[in-house]
Amino acid sequence: MSALGHVSLLGTSALLFEAPGETTLDAQRRIWSLAREAMAWPEVREAVPGMNNLMISLRRPPGAWAPLAERLRLAWDSVEPLPLEGRCIELPVTYGGDGGPHMADVIAYSGLTAEEVADIHSAPTYPVFALGSHPGYCYLGGMDPRIATPRRRTPVLSIPGGAVSIGGSQTGVSASAGPSGWNTIGSTDMTFFDVSRTPPALLQPGDSIRFRIRKVLP
């Protein structure tokens, strides 16, 4: 990947820009800034930030997409990080027990106790980097590497909404029931997506989450 990022074609009318370097809050703020700039371009219908990437959907298939790809790279080189400061939502979590069936795997991998995992997991304020995977789901940054645990070799067919999980160096909360390859360590009660709300997703990039320990179960 070049210093100005990599651009690939998605179907006939979308491009994916992948930023160079590591996924950090500063890089993600540049992604947000790039999304805002791209939305002002007349040929762009939608700009959707991802984790260290940006997908732009075009109003019509371009005759040639190389000039637009170069425009994205040059814009990335010039944009300043966008300091979005949104709301901070506090989520009470019950760690372990039936709602955290993979806590034992995180304990075995990290060498920590359940109480230590809960303390470390609940300490940071997690910025919302992007939305994706399923409606209302937030990709979060800022997890302590001491509790990073590889994704499961065999995904679970269904975890409930509100499942708090760890996958590699990231953590997240399922917004609805569905399959997952992450390690579920707890559960919380929160509606992350509701079509009757405007916007339907509870959280947006720039918001943040704080996990609060409700209890730790064996």
Image: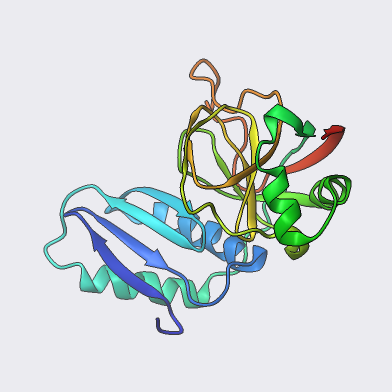
Q: How is the image coloured?
A: rainbow
Residue at image coords 68%, 60%: 148
Which residue sits at x=57%, y=35%?
Answer: 174
Which residue corresponds to the image point at 63% horizontal and 55% vertical from the top-left?
170
Q: Position of residue 112 (x, y in %)?
A: 83, 56
Q: Is residue 145 positioned above or below 212 on the image?
A: below
Is any atom of residue 143 visible in this view?
Answer: no
On the rendered structure, is 23 left or right of 85?
Answer: left
How many numbered circles are shown?
0
Q: Where is residue 106 in the image (x, y as percent from the top left)?
A: 70, 52
Q: In this view, does 190 lie above or below 50?
A: above
Answer whether residue 86 is visible to the viewer in this image: yes
Please name whichever residue, 39 or 87, is drawn nearer the observer in this view of the structure. 87
Residue at the far left in the pictured view? 63
Residue, far top:
196
Q: In which quarter of the image is residue 96?
A: top right
Between residue 159 and residue 189, name the one nearer to us. 159
* In the displayed structure image, the side of residue 7 where residue 155 appears, left or right: right
Residue 99 at x, y = what percent? 69, 29
Q: Quadrant of the C terminus?
A: top right
- In the displayed structure, does residue 135 sit left or right of residue 125? left
From the top left corner, tell me how far across and down residue 212 is, in percent.
84, 37
Give whichever of 5, 72 is nearer the camera: 5
Which residue is at 86% across, 36% downward? 213
Image quarter where the N terminus lies is bottom left
